[in-house]
Image (cartoon, rainbow, N blue to C red):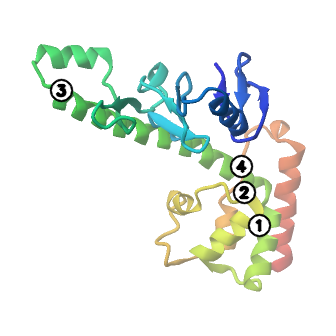
C-alpha cells in the first residue's frame, strides 16, 4: 500500500494505510542493499491509465496487470518481460483483456490469442471514447455555468482585447474565455459544441453571451446570485444600445 512520490522524504498516504516515499528514500535503500538497483511494485493504477509507469530515476517500476480495473477504470494492463539472454534488460507488453463473458465466447469459437488481442483493443478504444464523452459532459456543464456567472466579466474582457469590437475570431474568443474562466477547459471542443462554425470564421461575442440565460419556471427558486448576474448583464447591454 506504500507508493512512490516526487517529493523527498516520507509522508502519510492518502490511502489511509502505508506511506508515500520520495526518491531520496529509494536512493538510500539501494545504497544500503547493494546489489539491488531496481524495485518493481504494484497495487496502484499507473498515471495515464497505462499498464506500467517508471519513477525515481526510472528505477521504481509500477506494474499493474489488471486491465479495466473494477470493470470501469478503462486502464490497460501490462506484464514485464525479462529474458535470461538479455538480462538485466527488460520490456513491457500492454493489453486490454476482454471481460469473462467475451473470453468464454472466444474460447467456444476456438479463436486464437491474436483474436483475443484484437477484441480487447477494440473494446479499449470504445471504452476510452465513452470515458471522454462522459468527461466532456461534466466539463461542458461546468463551462456553461461559469459563462452564466461571469457574463459581465467576459464582456469587459472582450472590450479590453478587441477595443469593443463584437465580431471575434476563434483565437480571440479563446483568449477572452480563458482569460476569465481559466485555461483548464477544452475550448476548441467547446467551439464545436456550441456550433460556432469553423475555427477560421468569426462569431458575434455579444450574441454568444446572450445564449446563456437561466430560465426557471418558479422565480422563487432563482438564486440571488443568478438574479444579480442576469440583471447586471442586461444593464450593460442596455447601456450600449
Mark linked to residue 145: 4
Q: Nearer the viewer, mark 2 or mark 3?
A: 3
Residue located at (53% from left, 67% from top): 196
Q: Secondary structure at mark 4?
A: helix
**Residue placed farthest to the left in the image?**
110
Q: Is residue 195 left or right of residue 117?
A: right
Question: Of marks 1 and 3, which one's residue comes earlier in the chain?
Answer: 3
Residue located at (35% from left, 40% from top): 125
The residues tagged by marks 4 and 3 sit, at their Cα atoms, a distance apart of 48 Å
**Residue 88 sits above or below residue 186 on the image:** above
Give the residue at mark 1. 154
Q: Is residue 90 left or right of residue 27?
A: left
Q: Quadrant of residue 32?
A: top right
**Crowd class of label 3 (few under 14; some 14 to 19; many from 20; radius 10 Å):** few
Q: Quadrant of residue 235?
A: bottom right
Quadrant of the snapshot with the N terminus: top right
Question: Of marks 1 and 4, which one's residue comes earlier in the chain?
Answer: 4
The residue lying toward the viewer, choosing from 132 and 144, is 132
Mark linked to residue 80: none
**Do callouts 2 and 3 mark residues in contact (Cβ within 8 Å)?**
no
Q: Secondary structure at mark 2?
A: helix
The residues tagged by marks 2 and 3 sit, at their Cα atoms, a distance apart of 50 Å
Give the residue at mark 3. 113
**Crowd class of label 4 (few under 14; some 14 to 19; many from 20; radius 10 Å):** few
Residue located at (73% from left, 59% from top): 182
Amino acid at each position: 500500500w506504500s507508493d512512490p512520490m516526487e517529493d523527498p522524504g516520507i509522508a502519510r498516504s492518502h490511502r489511509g494505510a502505508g506511506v508515500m516515499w520520495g526518491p531520496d528514500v529509494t536512493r538510500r535503500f539501494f545504497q544500503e542493499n547493494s546489489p539491488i538497483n531496481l524495485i518493481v511494485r504494484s497495487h496502484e493504477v499507473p498515471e495515464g491509465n497505462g499498464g506500467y509507469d517508471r519513477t525515481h530515476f526510472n528505477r521504481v517500476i509500477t506494474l499493474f496487470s489488471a486491465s479495466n480495473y473494477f470493470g470501469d477504470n478503462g486502464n490497460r494492463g501490462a506484464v514485464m518481460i525479462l529474458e535470461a539472454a538479455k538480462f538485466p534488460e527488460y520490456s513491457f507488453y500492454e493489453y486490454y483483456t476482454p471481460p469473462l463473458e467475451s473470453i468464454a465466447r472466444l474460447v467456444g469459437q476456438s479463436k486464437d490469442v491474436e483474436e483475443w488481442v484484437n477484441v480487447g483493443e477494440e473494446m479499449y478504444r470504445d471504452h476510452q471514447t465513452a470515458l471522454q464523452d462522459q468527461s466532456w459532459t461534466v466539463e461542458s456543464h461546468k463551462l456553461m455555468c461559469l459563462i452564466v456567472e461571469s457574463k459581465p466579466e467576459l464582456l469587459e474582457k472582450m472590450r479590453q482585447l478587441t477595443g469593443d469590437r463584437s465580431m471575434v475570431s476563434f483565437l480571440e474568443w479563446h483568449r477572452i474565455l480563458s482569460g476569465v474562466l481559466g485555461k483548464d477547459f477544452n475550448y476548441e471542443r467547446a467551439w464545436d459544441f456550441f456550433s460556432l462554425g469553423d475555427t477560421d470564421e468569426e462569431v458575434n461575442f455579444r450574441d454568444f453571451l446572450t445564449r446563456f440565460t437561466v430560465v426557471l419556471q418558479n422565480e422563487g427558486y432563482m438564486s440571488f446570485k443568478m438574479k444579480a448576474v442576469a440583471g447586471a448583464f442586461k444593464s450593460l447591454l442596455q447601456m450600449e444600445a
